[in-house]
Image: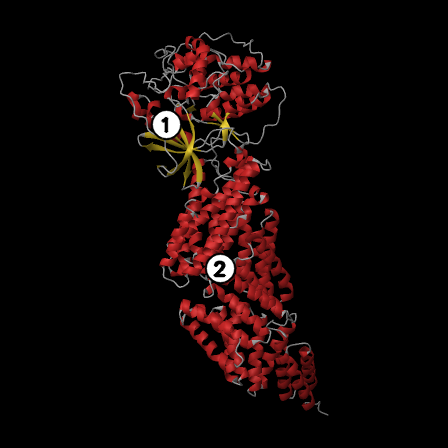
Amino acid sequence: MDEVEGRCLGENTLDGLSRGHLSPEERAAAARHLDACESCRQLLAALGQAVSTPGVATPPRDSASAPQEVRPRLTSGDRVGRYTVLHVVGAGGMGVVYAAYDPELDRRIALKLVHDEALPADSREEAAARLLREAQALARLSHPHVITVFDGGRFDGQVFLAMEFIEGGTLGQWLRAEERPAEAVLEMFLEAGRGLAAAHEAGLVHRDFKPDNVLVARDGRVRVTDFGLARLIVSGEPALGAGAALPRALPAGAEARTQTGMRLGTPLYMAPELWRGAPADARSDQFAFCVAFYEALQGERPFTVDQLAEGTQGPGGLSGASRIPPQWRLLLARGLSAKPEERFPSMAALLDALESKQASRRKRRLTVGAVLGAVGLAAVGFGFFGWHVKSRDVCAGSRERLAGAWDEARKAEVHAALLKTGSPLAPAAWTGTERLVDRYADAWVQMRTDACEATHMRGEQSGELLDLRMSCLAQRREALRALSQVLISSDKGIVEKAVQAAAQLPSLEGCASTEALTAQLRLPQDAAARARIDKVRAQLADARALHAAGRYEASRALLQEVLEASKAVSYKPLEAEVLHALGLAYVSLEDTPQAQKTFSQALVAAEAGGHLEVAAKTASMLAMVHGMHLRKHEQGHFWLDFCAAVLGRLGSAPAIAAERLFVLGNLLSDEGKPQEAVPVLEEALALQEKILGPEHLNVARTLGRLAFAVGALGRTSDSLAHAQRALSILEKLVGPEHPLCQPSLHSVAFALAISGKLPEAVPYAERALANDERTFGADHPAIVKSLIVLSNVQTDAADAIPLLERALAVQQKSKNMDDPDTVFIVKNLAGNHGLLHHYKEQLEYARQALALEEKFLGPNAPEVGQSYQLMGEAHERLGDPARALPLLERALSIAESRPLAAESPTGPDMQVATRRALANSLWALGRDHQRARTLVKEAIELTRGGSEELVQQAAELEKWLVEHPLPH
């Protein structure tokens, strides 16, 4: 409530007094003030109200009309349309303002319910309809110093308005809090005046401008609000000039109404022509502005109620206004002229004059409108809190913001939905999902609270940056809501992907990065356009959640629709986001050509819209598609360099940087460069552990790749340690029988195998295959990798061949013969048949492998050289050295063009075998005996320091040299 001792009573105090809303102590204080203050008694009379006996409500002035039933105030949890009421934040003569939550746009809003009795009883429906039309007109006005109106409607017979939620107080409270320098007061009124001028330019009249209808946010930003009395200027309405015929007069002390019966406003700010019954216009708003500005500077109002009602306000110099700087007095005198035509032609003209007379002009502080234009933040909700509210209280309640996204009720729904599927994986899937999402939600709450306190408690952060962080966090909450909604509709397929989906929630780190936030995108200034963008982003969140849950085709179909919607809003950054998500869907659907095309389109849109985050993510995915899926390593490196360049522009983005390093490490490993891959993967791992924590699916994924890379360098103990840690993480998150454990089971089997512990590796490979068969069935393509791994750890080639033949049959049945796994199958079949001296089978499978590799990888890939070696060796063993020779020469040429690496397709094992077979072929053909012996000697050198098998071959090669002396 306003202070009632000393200063004159404010309208809210008088309104509360008449409605019986004051406490007994407040009523007593108000009564004492009224006894001694003629001005306040006149004001109370002008409002058509009187003080009743304490505890007894004042009856309506119009005794002929039936008393209106007073509706109880809404309470927390009540619904008004789609809005959920949170708490009351203010009340006045026109209505009650509540803090409310908008679930569609995921933001807090201010919800104003207009009192029935504030509308004229004889034309209430007409007035309500007019008020809603005017609210719609205001919603089309987008200006940094005008409150944003989102929506309006009817509820229980009352009119409601949904508006921007401003955290702070009113200009009246700001003025009363302490004595303010004249320059500071001018700054505040200039901003308020700009908002008022913008409304006039849009054809709107405020009709009740006063300090208590101007909001000041906690960072000092100003908004003109409470346009509840505004109306559209009627085209062709006669001007209030000297010769204009005025409507009926309004006696002093009577309730001020327009021709249609609408209450005009606060009497002490009303222009004289309004007291005579004239309609309000921009010049009457100008008069009210000047009254308020005069009062703020001088500490008292320029006129009494009687002077205003009778049109007898003092002379135009305001010479007695001793506290008002002289350069402003004449300007105020003109704005306070009794005749409208003698005032400034517009608010803009008055403001320009005030600024030009400003004695010590200071640089105006950055307004929220400029920030919106520069960094693209959609309007965010604030709250009508008095200046006495503690910042810690303002920053409380972040956990409640997750209601409907991830609260106890939503968690119970997800848990029940997962168990209802009957999947044996459901209990472990719930445990892992809950663990990851709880961690994400806790981090979200902590970050949101910290963001608020950084501005309101510690003063470390501007209000503009707080807005950016809150907008970023609101988008993350939308992703959480979409995910939980998909999980509630669980089937067995979603159960399998639940933990993986939780791990794919968008990173929070971008919401803490000043660089990333201030590199955000320029949003349209139009509120309606921003609302359309928010709606499309909500659909995008739903599509991403479907993808994360493994519903790839459903996600792709929805994303096609969302793409059209994003194009319709003509906002390139949003189009880039949708195209990137669509590219990921094509990757999951294994449609590499469409993925490549879509990511290219996403990159173009991201560059056009300045969306650096999407540009970096898309470049990383293009590196994966080109470098890994298509095995075009050079192009993969190009896109990774491009990604690094974008990250340099974006600033701190550790999640994207970690993913780029992961792709680079994979690419280097695929090129046979484990010594370069290992430090890159280790850096990626360190970043992921810092961002995601030590137990996350992405951490396990990187550990698995690192196990293979260090194993290729002969670091068998490190390889096993990484693989076992990855498996431990996954078993904790999803349970030991979940398909997500398969890559780590494969890694452990690999690490044991290269350590020479094949018997210990077999159980891990068998467990992986059993998990796959239990989950997918005996003939599903998902089991192929486990069949390959199990075949690799067999000590006997005869045991490996049936496993590989089964894998090949699955590929043939599922028409996956062009799949990269098919290459591994047929090449391993060739190798194992060779070990059993089945050289015809070796030749046939090696031919199949060569055809696929040349198609996928090109003619000079290291894998191609290995296939040439297997074919040449088969011909040589079959006694056809003439056919063997060119194949072996080609194999050796490819091998020698690349660095020697232990686990490369052109590694020591392959080069030793190639040289030996080539020497045998040359000798059999009687050609170049010297070169044949040189090749064998080179093979012996390659065995030194190698595996046990290579060392054993050294003795055989030495024997070959003895048995094949140079002819004399």
Q: 777 left or right of 951?
A: left
Helix, strand or loop at disc 1? strand
> Real-space Cα distance between discs 2 and 1?
52 Å
Disc 1 residue crowd, few under 14, some 14–19, many 20+, Cα 10 Å: many
Q: Position of residue 660 (x, y in %)?
A: 58, 56
**Relative to 133, residue 909 above or below:** below
Q: Which mark is residue 114?
A: 1
Q: Which residue is mark 2?
A: 733
**Relative to 487, residue 827 above or below:** below
Q: Position of residue 360 (x, y in %)?
A: 63, 21
Q: Position of residue 249 (x, y in %)?
A: 36, 10
Helix, strand or loop at disc 2? helix
Residue 219 seen anywhere in this rendered image of the structure: yes
Residue at the outermost right position = 968
Residue at 60% across, 47% down = 651
Residue at 44% across, 55% down = 547
Inspect the image, locate mark 1, and give the three-letter code of the amino acid beneath it: Val
**Relative to 549, residue 284 above or below:** above
Q: 257 left or right of 615?
A: left
Counting residues from the N terminus, which is met first, the one under dot 2 or under dot 1?
1
Q: Quadrant of residue 758?
A: bottom right
Q: Position of residue 399 (x, y in %)?
A: 47, 43
Mark toward the viewer: 2 or 1: 2
Q: Which mark is residue 343?
A: none
From the viewer's side, name the closer residue of 375 and 19: 19
Q: Quadrant of the C terminus?
A: bottom right
